[in-house]
Amino acid sequence: MSGSNQTASDPSDIDLSDPQYYLSRELTWLEFNDRVLHEAMDERTPLLERLKFMGIFSSNLDEFFMVRIAAIEQQIEAQVSQLTPDGRTPQEQLAAASDRVQKLITQQHQHFETVLRPAMAQQGIYLLDYFDLNQEQRTYLQSYFEEQIFPVLTPLAVDPGHPFPYISNLSLNLAVVIKHPETGEELFARVKVPKVLPRFISLPNGLQSATAIELPVIDHPTRELRENPLQTNPNCPQVWTGIALEQLIAHNLESLFPGMNIQDCFTFRVTRNADISVAEDDADDLLLAIEHGLRQRRKGGSTVRIEVDSTMPSKIRQMLEEELEVTAQDVYEVNGMLGLGDVMSFLSLPLPELKDPHWNASIPASLRRLTATEDGGNFFSLIAQQDLLVHHPYQSFTDTVERFITCAANDAKVLAIKMTLYRTTGDSHILKALIKAAENGKQVSVLIELKARFDEQNNINLARKLEQAGVHVVYGLVGLKTHTKVVLVIRREDEKIRRYVHIGTGNYNAKTSSLYTDVGLFSSRPELGADLTDLFNYLTGYSQQRAYRKLLVSPVNARESFERLIQQEIDRVQAGGTGRIVAKMNALVDPQMIANLYRASQAGVSIDLIIRGMCCLRPGVPGVSESIRVISIIGRFLEHSRIYYFHNGGDEKILIGSADWMTRNLDRRVEVITPIDDPKISKDLQEILGIMLADNRQAWDLQSNGSYIQRRPRNSHDEQNTQQILMDMASQ
């Protein structure tokens, strides 16, 4: 990882707090989602995986509105005037984000209608419009509607006697225009498309003939977008044929409004603020306070977005704006099917040739050599001899992390288990192991972060289940989120106490471990065990711990430690030596850390940043960031690991942990970053970083203007796909 010595002109006349040197947090997040959308548009990605990325893009955008846009609108309502580091007011942030979102969703829907739906048809997957159906298919679906759908629906009139109904968050709805047959009065009603029913209704095998697909294109909003009508592929058997649920409801509205004249209907979708407001300092019981907040969220906060069918008349659109208390800026036109997040369901089709090849995570060689014993003693013996690095999903989470905790639960020599849980599943092996450990008489302490956004209810359920089993549960700290990923096992060996640790970058969640890339360290180094003991005493009791032996801990010493490491690289370059920094993280937002990197670049430190999502730093700015390069890796797995490398005058220093360089991670969360002392593991992590920096398939280069350019193999160069390379290495 060594780099060349660089020099720079005197930077003293440059104000590094100037907004011109910072990118908008919101816009950089949208650029990340644009890269996700590109995977859905990339012909090199298997077809069903493209639908998956199309769904991820939509789900990401939902969360963006529920959290980020909601927060900005709250700032506007509170008349906040503070500028962001990039120099924008809340109003300017909202306007810029709204403009970018409208362009992105237009691009998304055009690609889905003109490219992906025809591509699906070529593979025997026919997502039809109602107008595509033949009479036999319509007859079947009408019967299906009457038997399976009609009883579930609730038509809601809107008139003086029926006030405008509550529209729940992320709900898909039909705005129905009705004319009274006797008075001629135009009426309005709302029909919710139920989430309890499948979004896409399939036809039985005997009715999957797609002959109707060859009919001329009908003047219909969703069909207009297609370059060509869907065509059958004689060489490909039909796998699935069906229509969207809302279309079936729309063409059977007469059943819901008998005797009335249905004039038209239009789809719309609502997104609400999903924030939970909890006065932690005033709460007698944090768990009860969070539960109250969840009840409030289920009712839903203010509306932050309405998606509407592009054909919806202005009269209805204005009514929705008034009733839902939004402005025209909050309304997004969609020319096509709303709620494309649901297309991820097609990934369940039995078509392996249209998906990424199945990946079976490997077991680290050192663990494969162990003899399985009932108490797991051999696992601890291995860690006592050497540190062990695990890399998910390339290496098995089940056979490493879950095995470690299960062994601890059943090992007669283990006295206590302490761990933090941020996001996990209610049926996890870890949960079962912790309960088993308590039943075996061990001291088990678990901090469950109740404020993990969108996992609050699950974590409340977990907390109660563990408490009932005799586990000592702590709900989190007032004013801080506990985001760290650590386990501490205390074991008696030869009349002495030995501590074993796992410190990771990812959640203790078996499901996400197969989807997210994360690294973790197993170790029995005394300093790490002592530091985690101090940390857990801080988390569960009263402590003003201000120093740790080895660990970087937020909000105690992580920021100052990272700043010191950066400054050391600056000092060495200024002394005529070499400075080199490589940092992999999910987001770089903190202005102070960005300014530190700018100063390092001005001094001549060579800096490579691998940042999956938000990056507010501008690389390649003359006199400011000329020696900084930023890439983003987007692939089948979500890049989630945090790895930090510093050349350190040749005595290379590398760290892993749970913290990004965001203000919240450094100042408002409990995070743990551990240095890597094992030379082999250090080299392994450097190799991972090197593979990523050489990527020419999944890597995107950030430009100084905030845009990204995807790398492509040049001339006859081989494709360097980071995640494929790491899978190949793990399988050896």
Image (cartoon, rainbow, N blue to C red):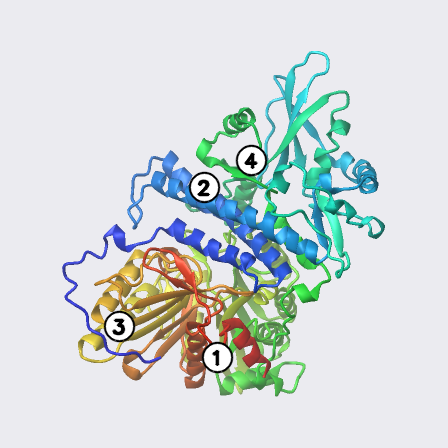
Q: Earlier in the sequence, mark 1 or mark 4?
A: 4
The amino acid sitting under disc 2 is Ala
Query: Which x, y percent locates residue 476?
Result: 48, 56
Mark number displayed over residue 310 = 4
Per the image, label 1 sits on a secondary structure element best described as: strand
Q: Is residue 679 visible?
A: yes
163, above or below 368, in the image:
above
Mark number displayed over residue 523 = 1
The amino acid sitting under disc 4 is Ser
Measured Cα–Cα span from mark 4 to mark 3: 51 Å
Q: Earlier in the sequence, mark 3 or mark 2?
A: 2
Per the image, label 2 sits on a secondary structure element best described as: helix
467, 330: nearer the viewer: 330
246, above or below 209, in the image:
above
The amino acid sitting under disc 3 is Val
Query: Image point 48% across, 48% down: which residue?
Result: 104
Per the image, label 4 sits on a secondary structure element best described as: loop
Query: Image point 30% across, 83% down: which residue?
Result: 650
